[in-house]
């Protein structure tokens, strides 16, 4: 895995590079993600999205990060649905890597770093992730980071006007 990969909390200045990646990669991500309004692909739309994510971070329910390769934004990693209560201590993990930076180990390294952050900084016990049933590269990333598939979530995501099943992945952070 590339040692130059790192993650950090998202910042307002990340809006322009994220918008550029998302606008360029709209067709590549269409089969994995729900449709977005046109403003999603603009710096202004991403700035508003970042503001909402940082509000979630301040409330303790979200840790929105960017993936950096050689200090350039190449994707995002998001820890959402954080439940820090002692009897729950869990969250969900999502991520994407720009097509210009894929197949270089950045996703795997970013997920590994997010797992460390969840265990060490956020004190979480359990993490879940979902993949499209056909998204084998993302499934490999999760498997290599200690996740196990635990079931199918039927009709879990609306893509191109049709409901699709998702594969649920889980990892217990206290276990090595």
Image (cartoon, helix red, strand yellow):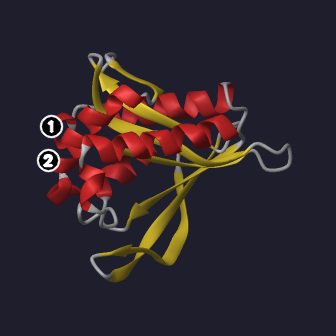
State yes or no: discs 1 and 2 in contact (Cβ < 8 Å).
yes
Label 1 sits on residue: 100
Give the percent coordinates (x, y) of residue 155: 46, 80
In the rendered structure, which disc, 1 or 2, sits on the residue that comes first in sequence?
2
Label 2 sits on residue: 24
Side of 24 where 145 appears, left or right: right
- Quadrant holding the N terminus: top left
User: Gap in Å between the C-alphas at discs 1 and 2?
Assistant: 10 Å
Foreground of the two, 145 or 61: 61
Q: Quadrant of residue 157?
A: bottom left
- Seen in the picture, residue 2 relative to 66 is either above or below; the reply is above
Give the percent coordinates (x, y) of residue 18: 28, 38
Give the percent coordinates (x, y) of residue 104: 23, 31
- Seen in the picture, residue 117 relative to 80 is either above or below; the reply is above
Q: In which quarter of the image is residue 30?
A: bottom left
Label 1 CA crowd tier, 10 Å (few <14, some 14–19, many 20+): few
**Residue drawn at (35%, 26%) of the image:** 13
- Quadrant holding the C terminus: top right
* Tally of numbered tags: 2
Question: Can residue 139 be seen in the rendering of this structure?
Answer: yes
**Residue drawn at (26%, 16%) of the image:** 70
């Amino acid at each position: 895995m590339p040692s130059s990969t790192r993650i950090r909390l998202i910042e307002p200045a990340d809006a322009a590079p994220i918008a550029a990646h998302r606008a360029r990669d709209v067709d590549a991500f269409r089969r994995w993600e729900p449709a977005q309004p046109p403003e999603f692909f603009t710096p202004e739309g991403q700035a508003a999205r970042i503001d909402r994510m940082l509000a979630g971070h301040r409330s303790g329910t979200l840790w929105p990060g960017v993936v950096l390769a050689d200090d350039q934004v190449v994707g995002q990693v998001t820890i959402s649905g954080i439940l820090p209560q002692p009897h729950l201590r869990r969250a969900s993990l999502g991520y994407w890597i720009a097509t210009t930076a894929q197949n270089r180990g950045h996703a795997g390294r970013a997920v590994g770093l997010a797992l460390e952050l969840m265990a060490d900084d956020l004190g979480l016990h359990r993490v879940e992730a979902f993949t499209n049933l056909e998204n084998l590269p993302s499934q490999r990333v999760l498997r290599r980071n200690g996740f196990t598939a635990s079931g199918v979530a039927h009709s879990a995501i609306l893509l191109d006007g049709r409901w699709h099943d998702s594969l649920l992945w889980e990892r217990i952070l206290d276990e090595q």
